[in-house]
Image: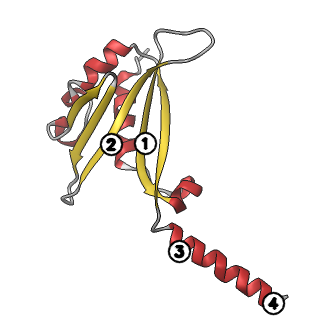
Amino acid sequence: MKRLLSILLIIVLLFVLASTFIPAGLARCLTVRNTIQNTVAALKHPEAWRSLDSGKSTHITEIKYMHFQISEPEPNGDSVDFTLALVPHASSRRNPDNIGISYVYTTTLFFKLLPFLQRPSVESAIVDELQDYLVPTR
């Protein structure tokens, strides 16, 4: 029994170790109370909502209808590139004042299986800033 338990423990540890090197995509979708027109206008002017050097280094390109490529250099010399899609909010009431923001970012299999252990990604920070900008204050 001890031998079986030790073999099982070794297999689990090898899987955890290997999963930290296997790339995986993680999708995230947010609902924002704003219109598509306002969201597209905000995406065309990142200096209005981006905090990193006032959005001057954030480049947003519309690659196809309601799909945007966002690229931004990081302080360590790398750059962040991801695609963001805007979708009308699909609810039973079809509220035109709600929009979905969907994006996929690269992570590892380990963090895909255990997302609560991962630090917020740069992509998440960018989209969260956009969401905060678009949410109307009361």
SS state under label 2: strand
Residue receiving disc 3: 17
Residue receiving disc 4: 2
Q: Is residue 104 left or right of residue 61?
A: right
Identify the residue at image location x=37%, y=22%: 134
Q: Position of residue 45 (x, y in %)?
A: 20, 25
Q: Earlier in the sequence, mark 3 or mark 2?
A: 3
Instruction: Residue type at mark 4: give it.
Output: Lys
43 and 104: which one is in front? Answer: 104
Query: For the residues marked 2 and 1, what is the alpha-carbon distance in whole angstroms?
Result: 7 Å
Vertical order, 13 against 1 (above or below): above
Q: Position of residue 81 (x, y in %)?
A: 28, 45
SS state under label 3: helix
Vertical order, 46 against 80 (above or below): above
Local crowd at mark 2 within 10 Å, few (<14), some, or many (≥20)? Answer: some
Query: For the residues marked 2 and 4, what is the alpha-carbon distance in whole angstroms?
Result: 47 Å
Residue receiving disc 1: 104
Residue receiving disc 2: 82
Instruction: Residue type at mark 1: give it.
Output: Val
